[in-house]
Image (tube, helix red, strand yellow):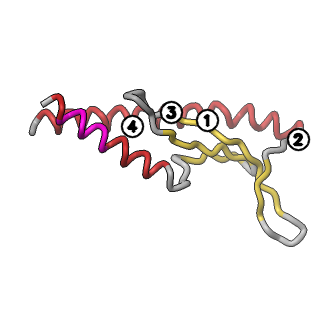
Amino acid sequence: MAGTRTMVNQQRKEKAMTQTNNNQPASTVRTGALKGVIWKNAGKDGKPDRYSVNYVRAYKTAEGQWKDTSSFSEVDNLKLGYLIPKVNDRIAELKASDREQEQSNDAEEEGQ
């Protein structure tokens, strides 16, 4: 039974890694032109998944195209002070969802 659970957990991790590698962020939190892009990184060797964040500012070029930069003005720094706690809250929500999913999967495995 334990061997089956380990194999199922490994398959789940591989699936998560595949989903993580599709270059889609786990979530994005915005305030004005600033955004915190949250990425899910699959845990290795039985460790839980981790999240990392890229902070960027959107701007419009002279040609009218939208681009992102990781360079911030002093005013942007103040706005980042507002954004960062919101990103931390969102990561906490994502981790709680991960735990709920893991518990649900474990309960499902035990019922088999």
Q: Which residue is mark 2?
A: 73
> What residue is at 59 percent from the left and 48 percent from the top?
28
Q: Earlier in the sequence, mark 4 or mark 2?
A: 2
Q: Earlier in the sequence, mark 1 or mark 3?
A: 3
- Picture quarter containing residue 97? top left
Q: Earlier in the sequence, mark 1 or mark 4?
A: 1
Q: Secondary structure at mark 1?
A: helix
Q: Secondary structure at mark 3?
A: strand
Q: Is residue 97 above or below residue 31?
A: above
Q: Residues within 10 Å of mark 4 (few under 14, many from 20)?
A: few
Q: Check residue 50 in the rendering and tell me which mark sits there, or answer none.
A: 3
Residue 33 image position (x, y, % from top left): 75, 51
The quadrant of the picture occupied by the N terminus is: top left
Q: Check residue 97 in the rendering and tell me which mark sits there, or answer none.
A: 4
- Asked if the residue at tag 3 contacts the one at tag 4, i.e. Cβ–Cβ closer than 8 Å, the answer is no
Magenta region: which residues? 4-11
